[in-house]
Image (tube, rainbow, N blue to C red):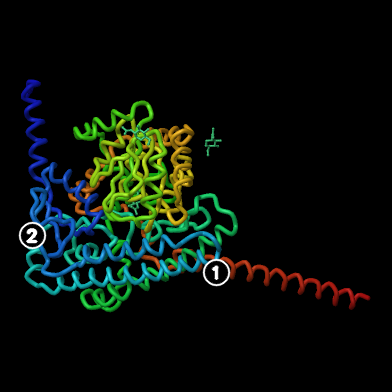
Amino acid sequence: MKMPFSSFLTFTLLSMQLSIVSGGKILVFPLDGSHWVNMKVIIERLHARGHEITVLRPSDSWYIKEESFLYTSLTLPCHGGFEENFDTYLSQQLEIRLQMKPESFWSKIWTQMQIRWVVLDQFTQFHKKVGDIITHMFENEDLMQSLHAAKYDMVLTDPGIGGGAMLARRLHLPLVFNARWTIHGEAHFLIAPSPLSYIPFTGTELTDKMSFPQRLKNVLSFFIGKLTLSYITDPSYKPIVRRFFGPDVDYSTFFLDADIWLMRNDFVFEFPRPTLPNVVYMGGFQCKPSTSLPADLVEFVQSSGDHGIVIMTLGTLVSNLPQDISEEIAAAFAQLPQKVIWRYIGPRPNNLGNNTLLVKWLPQNDLLGHPKTRVFITHGGTNGVQEAIYHGVPVVGLPLFFDQPDNLSRVKAKGAGVIVDIAMLNRHIFKEALMTVIYNSTYGDNMRTLSKLHRDQPMKPLDLAVFWIEYVIRHKGARHLQTHSYKMSWFVYSSVDVFTALLAAVLLVTFIWISVVRFLLRKIFTGGKIKH
Ligand SMILES: *[C@@H]1O[C@H](CO)[C@@H](O)[C@H](O)[C@H]1NC(C)=O
Ligand SMILES: *[C@@H]1O[C@H](CO)[C@@H](O)[C@H](O)[C@H]1NC(C)=O
Ligand SMILES: *[C@@H]1O[C@H](CO)[C@@H](O)[C@H](O)[C@H]1NC(C)=O
């Protein structure tokens, strides 16, 4: 049968539509806050492709709205306490961070220990809340029944909390992670070989080229980090696992079980490292071309002339800097010939220059994509660094907490920005840093190179992520991509048994050889004696 081209086209279009209509059913267990912002980018695309999405959220959820055309929400009748606690968390951390002046080695160590202590306490509280939510969820028979009955195709979750992975295990569903962190730390350290000789551990701000003392620091940080993390998470998750899954179940296997890891990493600015077949890199999936600026900003940006503009934002979490620091920043801005747009909430600094515009919110992506933008001042948060790379704008980094120092130290290692220590910040240091990045073209050039590299990929990162999610739906998982290493004891994994056997064989052979030689020598010796 011959099909005319036009009907062939209709047929193809129809079947494409059909395949869109018969989308999958995806259960999402998200992490609230800025992680949700990124999760939503993926959900939007999945929705557009016709998948049916259900999102689990606690009743006092912060960023995750109950009503949305993108998904159906299932509200758990319990409190995550995410929002009310987060502000206090951050201001506590910021306060200590600001005291961390690198004057003496010991005072630095001391403040770092203080931060560790505060973070330890805060994260313990946080995971305890998550543990409560999971317990509520599993205890609620009706809910679990209805989740079973709904016959989802897979669970999509952020392994920064333990709930999604446990839920997938409970419902026997394929599992896809939108990951960077697991509750055990940076995700690669859990799943892939990670030699500490060239892979900097989280929070060390080291690069892949380490001197002996740096490698020493790296190894020590690794062990301290591991201990700290199990101290933080074990008390919350272990009892739940014991209660709902049995006494001998190791909860790290819940994570190792994931079918696909969608990782928010970008090797354009991170250091190359070993990885695995079920890890898919989607760094920069949230980036998109800029659109035109709102009318009120257009005029301000245009008025900057050839000098261009400077943008500053410390993200959605830190709205308030101490007044003295804000004043120093304002004073540095006032001395620049550029125009400045500063996302700032709080009392207006007294010495604000007339070149500086304070805004409560700024269209970060559209400003970064604007040709007049010369430098981006960022804390190194979720989208900032990645969007700066996407648009090729060099940065001045003011890292505050979490993995922000690491993110920015990578940008610095690539020569695409400078870092200012916020505890040491004054108007001179800050202005100097800005002038360097604006007028020394190497920073901009390096960033534009990173941008070109980032954009030169066979498939857009978001399309790649969606492809693999649909792959898991089509094939009911991706077990064939998992390595067997997860099921081995450390003993077998590192071939200790094989090496021991080989060593024993070598020793045996040596022993036999020595005995034979000794026997022969004695024979010759005694034989000679007789002859004599
Ligand atoms: C802005 O301030 C500078 C220096 O203080 C001054 O020279 C300039 O005239 C001011 N511009 C406007 C538009 O007020
Ligand atoms: C650091 O950068 C990565 C990759 O862009 C991002 O996933 C992560 O959230 C960033 N860290 C923070 C604290 O935002
Ligand atoms: C620009 O910065 C680079 C990297 O820090 C440095 O090597 C170079 O000397 C600087 N150029 C000028 C003109 O200052």
Q: Residue sitting at 7 percent across and 20 percent down?
A: 4
Tell me the kind of residue under disc 1. Answer: Thr
Q: Do the residues labelled 1 and 2 touch (CB within 8 Å)?
A: no
Q: Mark 2 points at which residue?
A: 150
Work out whether residue 172 or residue 36 is closer to the camera in this orientation and state it. Answer: 36
Camera-near label (1 vs 2) is: 2
Q: State the separation of the CA atoms marked 1 and 2.
A: 52 Å
Up/down of 453 relative to 84, above or below:
above
Up/down of 96 relative to 340, above or below:
below
Q: Is residue 67 left or right of residue 44?
A: left
User: Badge 1: few (under 14), some or many (20 or more) residues near its Cα, within 10 Å?
Assistant: few
Q: Position of residue 222 (x, y in %)?
A: 46, 64
Report if residue 272 is visible in the image: no
Q: Quadrant of residue 67?
A: bottom left
Q: Residue sitting at 18 percent across and 70 percent down?
A: 133
Up/down of 138 relative to 103, above or below:
below
Report the disc number at residue 500: 1
The mark tally for this picture is 2
Q: Quadrant of residue 13?
A: top left
Tell me the kind of residue under disc 2. Answer: Ala
SS for dot 2: loop
First of labels 1, 2 by sequence position: 2
Q: Position of residue 390 (x, y in %)?
A: 33, 37
Q: In this view, does 409 lie to the left or right of 140?
A: right
